[in-house]
Image (tube, helix red, strand yellow):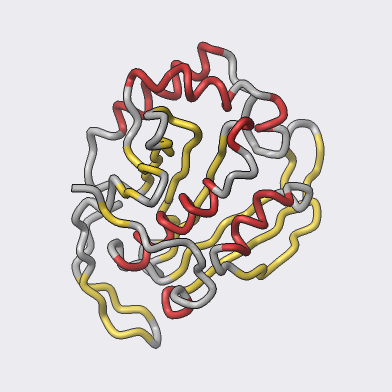
């Protein structure tokens, strides 16, 4: 993210952005942190799994692609502030990365960003992704001063849009065959939530920024 001064948005009073680092973040079971060189095998577990990435726009990865992704990410992490932040989702009980989640500022003037996430298959159904998604959206509003956060997914990816619904996002659109991915035209759901709406409907425990 870029360091902001004062931004005037139509109908909204100027806001001064407090661009301290808003991560790592700890929740009851998770730690959202930057990637480390030793995460390579954990990343490759989910990035190479055809079932995990079937409805995503990337993957499945070869080992070389995973290694290149990690090298690029480690280099990008040296820069701050930056507009795109990708974090490993570490399961505290196991001390390993079980997935990743990211926040990307797409519209600086209107203080809007999107989120994306992925989770290793053996950790599906445990509530880890709503916990992580709630934490990063909470940081986007409470610490990064954003106004709107959105996310998209393939309508066939029920688990993904259920995460969005569980943390209080609403479905704003269903785009028909708007993306050509993996040799087919795909529909997309668009979900979003505003800062002023955020306390309502957010069921996960409030995360803490790790020191």
Q: Whole-percent x and y of residue 58?
A: 62, 31
Residue at position x 62%, y 54% in the image: 152
Residue at position x 70%, y 25% in the image: 50
Q: Whole-percent x and y of residue 180?
A: 74, 41
Horizontally, residue 184 falls left or right of residue 74, namely: right
Label total for image:
0
From this view, report whether residue 206 is shown above or below residue 72. below
* In-front residue for pair 27/100: 27
Residue at position x 67%, y 68% in the image: 171
Horizontally, residue 56 falls left or right of residue 102, namely: right
From this view, report whether residue 33 is shown above or below residue 178. above
Q: Whole-percent x and y of residue 106?
A: 44, 56
* In-front residue for pair 40/76: 40
- Residue 113 sits in quarter: bottom left
Horizontally, residue 40 falls left or right of residue 6, namely: right
Residue at position x 41%, y 29% in the image: 94
Q: Whole-percent x and y of residue 189?
A: 70, 58
- Residue 112 sits in quarter: bottom left
* In-front residue for pair 6/135: 135
Name the residue at the top extreme: 64
């Amino acid at each position: 993210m870029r360091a902001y001064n004062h931004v005037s948005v139509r109908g909204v009073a100027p806001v001064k952005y407090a661009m301290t680092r808003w991560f790592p973040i700890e929740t009851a079971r998770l730690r959202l942190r930057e990637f480390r060189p030793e995460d390579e095998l954990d990343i490759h577990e989910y990035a190479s799994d055809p079932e995990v990435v079937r409805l995503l726009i990337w993957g499945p990865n070869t080992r070389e692609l995973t290694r290149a992704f990690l090298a690029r990410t480690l280099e990008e992490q040296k820069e701050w502030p930056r507009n795109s932040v990708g974090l490993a989702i570490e399961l505290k009980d196991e001390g390993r990365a079980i997935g990743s989640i990211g926040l990307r500022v797409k519209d600086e003037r209107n203080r809007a960003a999107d989120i994306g996430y992925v989770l290793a298959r053996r950790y599906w159904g445990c509530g880890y992704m709503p916990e992580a998604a709630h934490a990063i959206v909470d940081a986007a509003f409470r610490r990064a001063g954003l106004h709107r956060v959105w996310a998209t997914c393939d309508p066939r990816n029920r688990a993904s849009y259920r995460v969005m619904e569980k943390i209080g996002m609403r479905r704003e659109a269903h785009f028909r065959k708007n993306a050509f991915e993996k040799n087919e035209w795909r529909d997309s759901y668009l979900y979003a939530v505003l800062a002023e709406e955020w306390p309502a409907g957010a069921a996960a425990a409030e995360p803490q920024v790790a020191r």
